[in-house]
Amino acid sequence: MKISGAEAVIRCLLAEGVDLLYGYPGGAIMPVYDELYKFQDQLHHVLVRHEQGATHAAQGYARATGKVGVAIATSGPGATNLITGIADAQIDSTPMVCITGQVGKHLLGSDAFQETDIIGISTPVTKWNYQVTEASEIPEVIAKAFYIARSGRPGPVLIDITKNAQFDQLDFSYEKCTGIRSYTPVPKLNLEKVAAAAALINSAKKPFIIFGQGIILGQAEEEFKAVVEKSGIPAAWTILGLSAMPTDHPLNVGMLGMHGNYGPNLLTNECDVLIAFGMRFDDRVTGKLSTYAKQAKVIHFEIDPAEIDKNVKTEIAVLGDVKEALTALLPLIDAKSHDLWHNEFKELKKIEYDSVIKEELNPTNNKGISMGETIEMINKHSKGDAIIVSDVGQHQMFACRYAKFNSTKSNITSGGLGTMGFALPAAIGAKMGKPDREVVAIIGDGGFQMNIQELGTIFQTQVPVKIVILNNEFLGMVRQWQELFFDNRYASTKMINPNFVAIAEGYHIKSKKVTQREDLDAAVAEMLASKESYFLEIMVEKENNVFPMIPTGACVSEIRLS
Amino acid sequence: MENRTFTISVYSENNVGLLNRISGIFLKRHINILSLNVSESEIENVSRFIIVVETTEKWVQNIVGQIEKQIEVIKAFYHTDEETIYLENALFKIASSLLFDEKQIQNIIKDSQSTIVTVSRDFFVISKSGRRSEIEELYAKFKPYGIMQFVRSGRISVSKQKMEISTMLETFK
């Protein structure tokens, strides 16, 4: 069957099960858009307002569903606008395929109109990329792109297709990619290593589990819970591991890292065996590496060999699929309860509650509305069933510290790259991927204005996302650092904001602004009861700080409560 | 951990763009590549990169891990100088008149076990293969007489111990 390269692109996407993609048209991708027009009953294209929004929406879709998110853009500025989202997806291991148009093959390298070397630009932030210059290459390359994006440790892939390749004809047939000889997505599990890990776990007096997004990506939530419950070991999560295990699970002891909980951070430097599942010992988790868990023997369950010993030296490294590893581990570990060890976590939890959490969730100091109490109010009305998409900053830390989750793939945030502007488009993608779930975006006044134009996408698509702006009229996290480490010199962090409600209403999105604590409960209830999209601006305390905190470069046990 | 010289060998598919990916790994870590050579390997359709760097063993392990992550990389290894047989190749272009006027030049060529590649009316070209120190020694000897052009290749090396690459590739068939 002879078809054009552009039609082949669409047929490849359909063959990979894609029914939704995000993008923005332009000259060098127009043949593909022309085909999208013909296939619109099978492949739904969401017109975003900026290409960065397309990548974040594709990320939100991927993180909520576990499927590959797809974004599409033209050459030049269209392609470069994708880069932030691609970099974000790379560091947070999000499966995504981006397709960009490119100038014709005969113009490559000539500085033609809207030509950029997107392959060169995207190389450091993609799992793989490839420039297609002949129509006949399209099926094989797209098949490889999806295989690479979703297999092993997932990540973003970019395919750049020259305009001649979109126009030219090819004999079309499609075969899914099932293997590449130079690429081993999942290392083979070594059962001897699993047995050695089990023996070390069984011998531990103070074992401690830390878990990351690998549990979610490996669809190993049930196997993980079974191991935690049988072993009785306290388990703490990284920011991307959040929601892999229900927040209220009695063995879930809280969040690790810079603004994580007091107990898990402090006791990292007390445990005798530290068992890491699907996490990469990010510097926000470890603090000062030279003093991190030096007393502990470290067991690392990981799919990516390059993560082993990268930051923290391991005693036992178990490479492979985490679901398979946990299944093999379960029968080998002893059933225990570690009551005395748990008591240490409980004591520290009480200290943190009394000195930080109590006041944050129930302010008594007559100051403004706290970010923590707004998150608690969302918990009250969502009952832990919502997908929470948070942006980056103080509100993100409050959301990740206090939001409750009953089920997996419910916490969507920009972890590794820390991309302000992430949440609004990511929430669009999450809601489209999971239309039956409530999706609440929690965003600061700074981050909201970084991709505020995506209110237009919400208006046009009528996607019923709920948007909560926690407005403190500051770039709050930077201001906090200025207060703590730069002698209160608030350089360029005060925001003079527009009338956000008027802007949201300009996009015909139902809106409300809350300035008084007594109005908070009803406003959150009204927002969550709405069947349509809803914009809720909450004016919060201006100079509220997120604690606990491990200052940059400090040791995890130097965590500060104030 | 002290800095040492390491030779990194990368077996890969022969694809456009891979050099960019690999060099980016060094760029990110601000590690200077002392020498780089890419050629066909003993295996059909498989390229081999030989990269020489001076860094710590921890860093080289980390870098090799990151290189192996690249989709088109089949396998990467690193070795110390003691674990490899290595050499570089150099070409010296020298004025032909010196070959006849300076008798010592002929002795230098003979003693250094270098080869005369070509002789023309204006210049002759000497090729010398060997370790960096041998080439530098020869350079120092020719320099007083005048060198019209000098060029040295990247390091090429083979490991003393067997690399399992061929066996690995067999399993893909």
Image (cartoon, coloured by chain):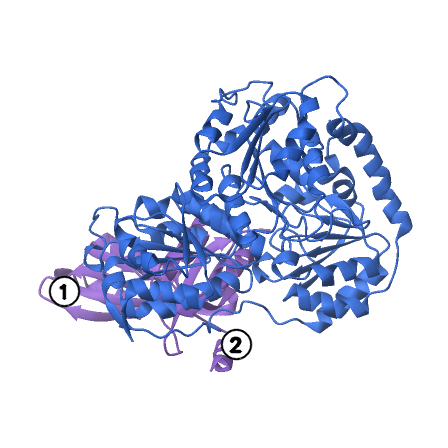
Chain colours: A blue, B purple
Nearest-to-viewer mark from 2 and 1? 2
Determine whether label 2 and label 1 are within 8 Å by CB: no
In the rendered view, would you say A369 is above or below A182? above
Question: B19 or A363, which is in the foreground?
Answer: A363
In the rendered view, would you say B10 is above or below A175? above
Residue A193: x and y in percent read 71, 69
**Image quadrant where one finds the C terminus of chain A:** top right
A145 sits to left or right of B16: right
B120 sits to left or right of A222: left
Are marks 2 and 1 in one subunit?
yes
Amino acid of disc 1: Phe
Question: B138 or A62, which is in the foreground?
Answer: A62
Amino acid of disc 2: Glu
Q: Mark 1: few, some, or many residues within 10 Å (few <14, many ≥20)?
A: few
Asked whether residue A29 is in view, the answer is yes
Q: Chain of mark 1?
A: B
Residue at the farthest right position: A340
Q: Residue at x 76, y 67 (%)?
A: A329
For residue B164, which numbered disc appears in the image? Answer: 2
For residue A252, which numbered disc appears in the image? Answer: none
The count of marks equals 2
Residue B127: x and y in percent read 26, 67
Asked whether residue B29 is in view, the answer is no
Q: Residue at x 25, y 49 (%)?
A: A27
In the rendered view, would you say B37 is above or below A113? below
Q: Chain of mark 2?
A: B
What SS does tag 2 mark? loop
Residue A20: x and y in percent read 45, 56
For residue B100, which numbered disc appears in the image? Answer: 1
Q: Residue at x 51, y 60 (%)?
A: B64
Q: Residue at x 25, y 46 (%)?
A: A114
